[in-house]
Amino acid sequence: MSGKEKRRYVRTKLKAEVQVTHPELGPMKMQTSDISDGGARIMCQTDQMPNVGDEVEVQVQGIGGGDAPVVRMRVVRIDKDGIGLEFIHPE
């Protein structure tokens, strides 16, 4: 399987403005680059970034019909362009 995609979920390209709220850093405006059933890739242009393992709340912004739900996510990856988040599913 060397060189093949090892992701469990199919990614869908999606550019959406989101508010990512970290317990210490507060709310930050960011944009998704893609999303899947397991999580999302968020593009960041800020010096303050959460750490791998941190939990954040994410809410899509600017959709019609009222406020979008707030979902809990965990930071699983960080690189120079952004962060990878996974959904935290209630047990």
Image (cartoon, rainbow, N blue to C red):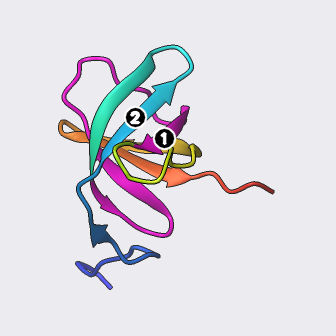
Spatial separation of the CA atoms under disc 2 and disc 1? 6 Å
Circle 1 crowding by C-alpha within 10 Å: few under 14, some 14–19, many from 20: many
Mark 2 and mark 1 residues within 8 Å of each other at the beta carbon: yes
Q: Secondary structure at mark 2?
A: strand
In reply to whether residue 26 is colored magenta, the answer given is no
Instruction: Give the position of the N terminus as an image quadrant.
Output: bottom left
Near-viewer residue (9 or 58)? 58
The image shows residue 81 at horizontal and vertical percentages of: 18, 39
In percent of width and height, residue 5 lies at 30, 78
Amino acid at circle 1 = Val
Residue 47 magenta: yes
- The span shown in magenta is 33-60
Q: Quadrant of the C terminus?
A: bottom right
**Residue annotated with mark 1:** 58
* Residue corresponding to mark 2: 19
**CA neighbours of label 2 inside 10 A, class few (<14), some (14 to 19), many (20+):** some
